[in-house]
Image (cartoon, rainbow, N blue to C red):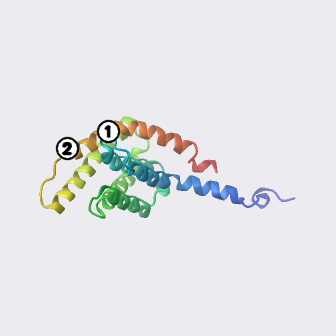
């Protein structure tokens, strides 16, 4: 009687679908969140929440599961963010790709770091990315735009990341855990 790998059955269709859904969860969450935040709820500061949500998702998933958020999907989410926010097409795609690249480059040092450090670094990255978005738009309009939306985005990023990270950690360890397939 054969033992080991010869006895293993090929994965069922449901198991393959489960593995695919777990792998696709980060990108689907990013796109779904942007679409929901793009709906006209009339919340004050809602426009500033979209880029904060996108930056937080790109930072978190690039840190903890970079293979599940490919660069093409990050760029597509950036284009969606541009379309929803009426910013120059490609601006947020480039900025989110930059954030993803820097996060992946620093990943070896950030994954074992304490949460307070990763939170502080995310806040610094969010401030830098928001400033670059402001500079790009100011350059396009050939005038200095007000800085208060950039400051508001940075404050939202600093304040909302711990709660959003807690939810993403639960998803990362629970329904989106690839290792559970």
Query: How far is disc 1 from disc 2 in space, using C-alphas?
Result: 15 Å
Q: Secondary structure at mark 2?
A: helix
Quarter of the image for residue 80 reads: bottom left
Q: Nearer the viewer, residue 45 or 65?
A: 45
Q: Nearer the viewer, residue 55 or 179?
A: 55
Counting residues from the start of the chain, the first of labels 1 and 2 encountered is 2
> Which residue is identified by label 1?
158
Name the residue located 39 percent from the left edge and 48 percent from the top edge: 37
Report whether 74 appears left or right of 179. left
Q: Is residue 150 above or below residue 95?
A: above
Residue 148 circle label: 2
Q: Secondary structure at mark 1?
A: helix
The answer to the question of whether label 1 and label 2 lie on touching residues, with beta carbons closer than 8 A, is: no
Alpha-carbon neighbours of circle 1 within 10 Å: few (<14), some, or many (≥20)?
many
Q: Position of residue 58 (x, y in %)?
A: 40, 52
Q: How many marks?
A: 2
Alpha-carbon neighbours of circle 2 within 10 Å: few (<14), some, or many (≥20)?
few
Q: Is residue 95 above or below residue 167?
A: below
Q: Is residue 160 above or below residue 6?
A: above
Report whether 37 appears left or right of 168. left
Q: Position of residue 1 (x, y in %)?
A: 87, 58
Residue 31 circle label: none
Residue sticking out furthest to the right:
1
Q: Position of residue 142 (x, y in %)?
A: 13, 61
Q: Nearer the viewer, residue 3 or 130?
A: 130
Eye-nearest disc, 1 or 2: 2
Name the residue located 33 percent from the left edge and 36 percent from the top edge: 159
Residue sticking out furthest to the left:
143
Q: Nearer the viewer, residue 121 or 26?
A: 26
């Amino acid at each position: 009687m054969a033992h080991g790998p010869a006895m293993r059955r090929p994965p069922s269709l449901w198991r393959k679908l489960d593995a695919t859904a777990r792998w696709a969860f980060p990108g689907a969450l990013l796109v779904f969140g942007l679409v929901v935040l793009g709906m006209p709820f009339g919340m004050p500061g809602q426009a500033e929440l979209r880029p904060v949500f996108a930056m937080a998702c790109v930072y978190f998933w690039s840190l903890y599961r970079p293979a599940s958020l490919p660069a093409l999907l990050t760029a597509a989410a950036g284009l969606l963010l541009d379309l929803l926010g009426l910013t120059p097409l490609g601006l947020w795609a480039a900025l989110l790709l930059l954030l993803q690249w820097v996060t992946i480059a620093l990943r070896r040092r950030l994954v074992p770091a304490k949460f307070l450090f990763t939170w502080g670094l995310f806040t610094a990255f969010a401030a830098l990315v928001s400033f670059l978005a402001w500079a790009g738009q100011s350059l396009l309009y050939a005038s200095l735009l007000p800085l208060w939306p950039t400051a508001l985005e940075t404050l939202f990023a600093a304040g909302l990341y711990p709660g959003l990270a807690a939810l993403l950690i639960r998803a990362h360890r629970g329904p989106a855990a690839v290792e559970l397939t």
